[in-house]
Amino acid sequence: MDPRSLFELGDSPVPQTPRSRGVDPRSLFELGDSPVPQTPARAEWIRALLEPGLRSPDLAPGSPSCEVYNGRVRASRPRLFVALDAASVSGGAVARSGDGYRFASHARMALPAGALAPSPFAANLARPAEVADALRELARELSVGAAPACLLLPDGVARLALVDVPADVTAQQYARFRIVPGLPYPAGEAVIDVMPLGPGRAVVAAVRRSIVEEYEAAAMRAGITQDRLDLTPLAAIAGLLREPGPRGGLTVDVVLGDAALCLAAHEAGTLRVLRNRRRDPGPDEARRLAEEVERTAVLAGDGAGTRIRVVGPGARGLLTSWRSRGGSAEPGWRSAGPANGVDAAELPWLGGAAG
Amino acid sequence: MSPERDFSSRPRSRRARPLDLGLLALGVAAVLLSGHAAVAAWSARARARARVDQTRRETEEAQSRARGLEGRPEPAEALAYRGLLTAEASPPRVLADLTALMPSDVRLDAVTLSYGEPLGVQVDVVARTASSYDLFLDRLQRSPLFASVLPGEENRDGELRTSIQMAYRPPGAR
């Protein structure tokens, strides 16, 4: 088997499936009813990529296939992600290499409208069975088997804050002090974790436990083995901060979700401002978001010459709209090599593979 | 930035990675090594303590012997010399040598022998005439058997009475 079919995302036209939107995952792996039928050997290939210690015979050390594989994903091992948002569930096994993200697998399943509504305190899964069905279909398309996946919750479910952490407390302790009093639910229900940004600085996040349990239950119902649970905006910001851009200039990253968005302004790798807003995808969203970017840049202390990057669902359309009005912005990240229709900038959770 | 954020309601125990296992093995090896080092150090301490105790005992024994030797009334050399004096300067011999030097009109009232180094002799002398006494004193001073002749105060009221201190030097000790 040619390992390029895993990474260069075969170029044979494959019919779209009714439930997928955007790219068909089978076109990535030639699985399902594609011209090359799925065989146990191919499933073993996928499994070998996802589970450390398992190795397909074709990936034997020293073999040409192994050399191609090592050369292309030398920077990191593919890790499996499953992300949920209001409009879809998506995921895949992704590795980060020097020139972008490489997909070992990818799939996306649309959700019926209203099945999932991200909220920080109300129940998110209005129709859990439909969400679980979409997740089950996603898992089947990805052939994940029992491989543990990182579950990513959508933007809009967590309270986020950028804090300066005093030297005599941990970021976790300080997060409880700063965030918990303002939460619209009892403190004991908050699940808190942090994203350290360096000495004395961190992004802290709190999610209501009952909401976390909703998503975990859906994943379990779909047969997905949960490894850990992260927040898509944090994963995206973490990935974007790993490539802060040219020194000396301010960068504003726009991380879009279906229901909310984050704006992160940073300079020389130092996060200066983090804003979290509900999204209102109306006809003039591009203009309003441009104003939000400008406000964020001003809050960060520099309103001019700002570099703007965008990731998340709708990123491509937003970039097109801004460019048509003379603005300059760029996608937050790209696929490494041919992506066969997968637009990496539309997948904010890819940042999770950068770690 | 940590890639290990976990907002799970019940964080899962993660499967050990090769790095984790390596670190665990390293930690176990370090514990074993430190345990071995601790046991070795403990044994060395016990051996050192035993050596200290032995040295202390030997020191105490040596000090005890030294104290014993210091407590003896006379050193061994003195004892040997006294033995020699006793053998070669017995009281009859000393008295005989002394009387051999005495003129006829000189007599001894008392003789005291102090055995030591040298053998001290003190005699109380009664001489009928002063010239006899002078002659006796002269003979003592010339005799090789007697040394350090020291005459005492003389009483020349009638008979001459005095005492003389001297040291007897037996022939073998010279």
Image (cartoon, coloured by chain):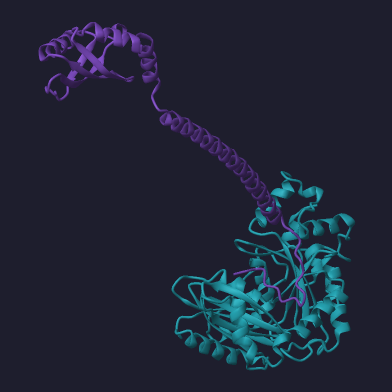
Chain colours: A cyan, B purple
Residue A45 at what x, y percent from top left? Answer: 81, 56
Image quarter of the N terminus of chain B: bottom right
Based on the displayed image, in which of its 4 quarters is residue B86 positioned? top left
Number of dots carrying numbers: 0
Q: Please determine whether, in this image, residue B8 is positioned above or below residue B144.
A: below
Question: Position of A240 compared to A7: left or right?
Answer: left
Front residue of A284 and A292: A292
Q: Is residue A177 above or below residue B41?
A: below
Q: Residue at x 48, y 84 (%)?
A: A300
Q: Could one spot residue A63 in this view of the protein?
A: yes
A279 vs B146, nearest the viewer: B146
Q: Is residue B143 or residue B80 the one in the foreground?
A: B143
Q: Residue A51: which quarter of the image? A: bottom right
Taking the image as drawn, is residue A19 in sight?
A: no
* Residue B14 x, y percent position in the rendering: 75, 64
Between A100 and B143, the one lying in front of the other is B143
- The quarter holding residue B141 reads top left
> In the rendered image, which quarter contains the C terminus of chain B?
top left
Q: Residue drawn at (52%, 87%), measured in percent from left and top?
A: A296
Q: Position of residue A173 (x, y in %)?
A: 61, 79
Please tell me whether residue A267 is drawn above or below residue B19 in the rendered image.
below
Residue A315 as seen in the image, left or right of residue A213: left
- Image location of residue B46, percent across then percent down: 60, 41
Left or right placement of residue B154 versus residue B94 in this view: left
**Which residue occupies the extreme front position in the image?**
B158
